[in-house]
C-alpha cells in the first residue's frame, strides 16, 4: 500500500537461506516513494531446540492465501496455510456444480503449502474449493 497509513499493516517473510544456527537477526528497510530509505532493527529470532525440521514459532491460520496465475492456462498453484495438522482436499467445480478435479486427501502439518493442479478442461469460469477439516474456502478461477 503506497503512502503512509495509520492502520496496522502485517507483513510476513520466509527466509530462503536460513543459517544453521538457533539465533537469527533480521533488519527491515522501509523505502519511500522518493527513493529514501530507513532501517529498523535488528530483531532477534531464536529457533527452539529440536533440530532443523522444527519450524520456528509463528502464527498460522486455516486459509486459502492465493491461487495463481488467475486467469490460468493448464496449471494453477494454490497457496494455503494450516493452523494445525489437518486433512486437506481440493476440488474444482464447473459452473454446473460438477466436480471436474478432486485431489486425494492430503494430511499436512501446521504451516504454509502450495498445491498444483494440472487441468486441461475447456476454457471458462471455475470454482476452486479448499476443504480443511470441516472448513471450506472457495475462489473463482478463469481458465483460458
Image: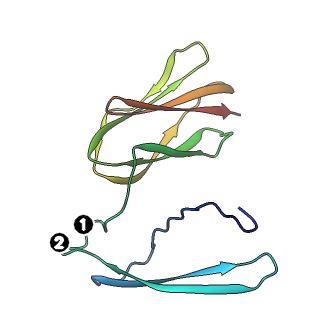
Q: Residues within 10 Å of mark 2 (few under 14, many from 20)?
A: few
**Quadrant of image for the N terminus:** bottom right
The foreground one among 62 and 121 is 62
The secondary element bearing badge 1 is classed as: loop
Residue 9: quarter of image: bottom right
Residue extending farthest top: 96
- The structure residue drawn at horizontal position 52% and vertical position 38%, both measured from the top left corner, is 118
Q: Residues within 10 Å of mark 1 (few under 14, many from 20)?
A: few
Residue 88: quarter of image: top left
**Residues at discs 2 and 1 in contact (Cβ within 8 Å):** yes
**Quadrant of image for the C terminus:** top right
Which residue in the protein does label 1 denote?
54
Which residue in the protein does label 2 denote?
50
Residue 136: quarter of image: top left
The foreground one among 2 and 141 is 2
Image coordinates of residue 47 in percent, x first then y, are 28, 76
Left or right: 20 as drawn, with respect to 92: left
Image coordinates of residue 32 in percent, x first then y, are 74, 78
The secondary element bearing badge 2 is classed as: loop
**Cα separation between marks 2 and 1:** 6 Å
The foreground one among 128 and 101 is 128
For the rendered model, the colour scheme is rainbow
Image coordinates of residue 31 in percent, x first then y, are 70, 79
- The structure residue drawn at horizontal position 45% and vertical position 43%, both measured from the top left corner, is 63
- The structure residue drawn at horizontal position 70% and vertical position 85%, both measured from the top left corner, is 37
Amino acid at each position: 500500500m503506497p503512502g503512509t497509513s495509520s492502520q496496522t499493516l502485517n507483513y510476513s517473510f520466509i527466509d530462503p537461506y536460513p543459517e544453521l544456527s538457533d539465533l537469527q537477526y533480521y533488519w527491515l528497510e522501509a523505502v519511500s516513494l522518493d527513493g529514501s530509505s530507513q532501517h529498523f532493527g535488528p530483531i532477534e529470532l531464536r529457533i527452539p531446540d529440536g533440530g532443523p525440521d522444527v519450524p520456528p514459532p509463528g502464527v498460522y491460520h486455516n486459509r486459502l492465501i492465493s491461487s495463481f496465475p488467475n486467469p490460468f492456462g493448464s496449471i494453477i498453484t494454490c497457496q494455503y496455510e494450516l493452523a494445525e495438522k489437518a486433512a486437506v482436499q481440493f476440488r474444482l467445480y464447473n459452473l454446473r456444480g460438477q466436480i471436474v478435479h478432486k485431489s486425494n486427501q492430503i494430511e499436512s502439518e501446521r504451516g504454509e503449502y502450495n498445491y498444483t493442479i494440472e487441468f486441461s478442461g475447456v476454457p471458462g469460469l471455475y470454482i476452486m474449493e479448499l476443504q480443511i477439516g470441516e472448513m471450506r474456502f472457495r475462489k473463482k478461477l478463469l481458465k483460458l
